Amino acid sequence: MRGEWNVSIRRACRVLLFDTSSYHYKSRRPGQAVLEQRIKEICQTRVRYGYRRVHVLLRREANDGAALLPLTALHQRDGKPAVWVYDPATQKVNLRAVEIGPYREDGVVIRGGLRAGEFVVTAGVHKLTDGQTVRPYEGAPAAQDASKASPVAPAPTPRKSVGAVPVQAALRP
């Protein structure tokens, strides 16, 4: 239309009842073909879903295989995020680099660096060192168990008690 009638963009958009900002819009995120294809697949199989529900489905897919940890579990190594992983066989902790996702009100999403079933230290992370022997915190001993202890028994070797949580296989918002 502009070439044939020799009119400006603004006038051509006004005649067609088309917003000029839409005419000038350029996407700032190149390489979204995979995402666009996935949105089309969801919309074809779930016709009644609106854009909000499609958005929730996409976020859930992005978080598959992720774990939600409390913020107190995060530590840093060389300015990069890491967590302390507890090995029940050796009762030692090791600092492992992780890939973090979005922060949430109830914690942080860990997208990579952990396997399902591993224990992550969630309390006292600032006092740990690599390879340190610890024991998971299981609560205060019961009064009955304390009365059965022999007063002559040697004191156990000092180990730090730390709070640990198992890593869940998947996260659901």
Image (cartoon, grey):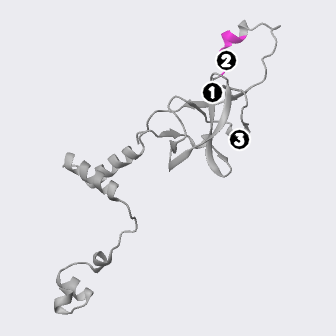
Q: Earlier in the sequence, mark 1 or mark 3?
A: 1
Question: Considering depth in this image, is 85 or 51 the residue closer to the camera?
Answer: 85
Q: Which residues are magenta?
A: 140-146
The residue located at (63%, 30%) in the rendering is 86
Estimate the spatial distance between the alpha carbons at disc 2 and disc 3, rounded to whole Å.
25 Å
The kind of residue tagged 2 is: Pro
The residue labelled by disc 2 is 141
Between circles 1 and 3, the one closer to the viewer is 1
x and y percentages locating residue 57 in the rendered image: 33, 46
The residue located at (67%, 23%) in the rendering is 90
The residue labelled by disc 1 is 87
Estimate the spatial distance between the alpha carbons at disc 2 and disc 1, rounded to whole Å.
23 Å
Between circles 2 and 3, the one closer to the viewer is 3
Q: Earlier in the sequence, mark 2 or mark 3?
A: 3
Can residue 9 be found in the magenta stretch? no
Label disc, if present, on residue 126 of the rendered structure: 3
Question: Considering depth in this image, is 147 or 51 the residue closer to the camera?
Answer: 51
Q: Mark 1 and 3 residues: CB-CB less than 8 Å, in contact?
A: no
The kind of residue tagged 3 is: His
Helix, strand or loop at label 3? It is helix
x and y percentages locating residue 14 in the rendered image: 21, 84
Question: Considering depth in this image, is 87 or 109 the residue closer to the camera?
Answer: 87
